[in-house]
């Protein structure tokens, strides 16, 4: 099954794609530092690459990737572009309202950037009261299981950033953009006020890595990528079945 990618379509092709299967996938990325070994667009590449695999499996319509997210913690590092949290939410809502007007019945948000998760959740909740189109939001479902099964290093207090996890996924998706000779291991000390003040990740790490990027491999990334693509495709299909099945459970997943 090929990917139906909106940005390459004519208006007629887009109309036919929605008529055939009225589900759209919106990848959400960010433009921010990922250590010295990964590109600033790592979250873009990860969200888009995973979304493309989901669309291949399901026939859903692939929307253009949102390249900016809430990246306040890295705002002083060159290359970072950060939107305000409520702006991210507003963009998601505007996209949802737009696609619903011409027949999309389910919108799937596929996130590659942890800080977008709150925006996704609250946008979906508000859209529940505004549109007759459910929205589901996905961020590496089953990540803890995959991390424990595939990765050799621990997370930094449960967080992933430029670490073995993300670097392995990038090696599977865009290996030409990974500079493994610059990969490092760093687990910064966690100050007592972190998470209870405006102290940010950008103040704590020298390399921008939170974990051990040196252990990343393409094989690990391919295994995790296959798992996440299957899980997300399954969740999309579950949501669509609920949507097309009469009864009160239609929107319980939002």
Image (cartoon, rainbow, N blue to C red):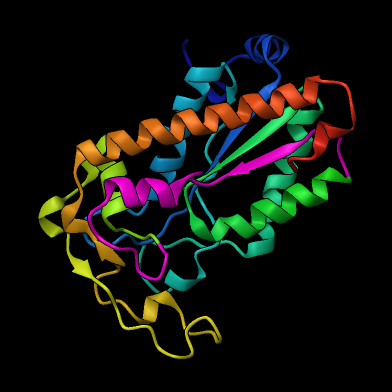
Q: Is residue 93 toward the left or the right of residue 55 in the image?
A: right
**Could you say which quadrant of the image residue 205 lies in?**
bottom left
Q: Position of residue 30 (x, y in %)?
A: 47, 53
Q: Is residue 123 toward the left or the right of residue 168 in the image?
A: right
In the rendered image, the vertical position of residue 62 relative to residue 81, given as above or below: above
Return the residue nearer the eye: 85 or 173.
173
Q: Position of residue 123 (x, y in %)?
A: 73, 51
Q: Position of residue 170 (x, y in %)?
A: 29, 43
Q: Residue at x 36, y 60 (%)?
A: 161
Q: Residue at x 69, y 62 (%)?
A: 86
- Viewport quadrant of the C terminus: top right
One can see residue 59 in this view: yes
User: Magenta: predominant secondary structure element?
Assistant: loop
Magenta span:
130-159
Residue reaching furthest to the left: 181
One can see residue 174 in this view: no
Q: Is residue 52 toward the left or the right of residue 235 in the image?
A: left
Return the residue nearer the eye: 106 or 247.
247
**Could you say which quadrant of the image residue 204 lies in?**
bottom left
**Could you say which quadrant of the image residue 134 lies in?**
top right
In the rendered image, the vertical position of residue 242 relative to residue 4, given as above or below: below
In the rendered image, the vertical position of residue 231 relative to residue 55, given as above or below: below
Reply yes or no: does residue 151 show up in magenta.
yes
Reply yes or no: does residue 34 show up in magenta.
no
Q: Residue at x 52, y 80 (%)?
A: 195
């Amino acid at each position: 099954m090929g990917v139906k990618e909106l940005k390459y379509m004519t208006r007629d092709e887009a109309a036919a794609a929605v008529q055939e299967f009225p589900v759209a996938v919106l990848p959400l990325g960010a433009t921010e530092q990922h250590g010295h070994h990964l590109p600033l667009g790592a979250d873009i590449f990860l969200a888009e690459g995973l979304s493309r695999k989901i669309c291949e499996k399901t026939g859903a319509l692939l929307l253009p990737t949102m390249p900016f997210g809430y990246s306040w913690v890295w705002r002083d590092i060159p290359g970072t572009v950060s939107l305000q949290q409520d702006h991210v939410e507003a963009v998601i809502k505007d996209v949802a309202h737009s696609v619903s007007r011409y027949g999309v019945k389910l919108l799937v948000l596929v996130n590659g950037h942890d800080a977008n998760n709150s925006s996704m959740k609250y946008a979906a909740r508000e859209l529940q009261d505004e549109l007759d189109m459910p929205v589901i939001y996905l961020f590496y479902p089953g990540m803890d299981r995959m991390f424990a099964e595939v990765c050799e290093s621990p997370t930094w207090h449960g967080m992933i950033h430029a670490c073995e996890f993300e670097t392995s996924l990038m090696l599977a998706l865009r290996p030409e953009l990974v500079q493994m000779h610059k990969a490092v291991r760093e687990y910064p000390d966690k100050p007592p006020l972190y998470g209870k003040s405006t102290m940010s990740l950008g103040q704590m790490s020298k390399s921008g890595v939170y974990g051990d990027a040196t252990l990343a491999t393409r094989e690990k990334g391919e295994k995790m990528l296959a798992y996440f693509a299957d899980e997300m495709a399954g969740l999309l299909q579950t949501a669509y079945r609920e949507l097309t099945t009469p009864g009160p459970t239609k929107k319980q997943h939002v």
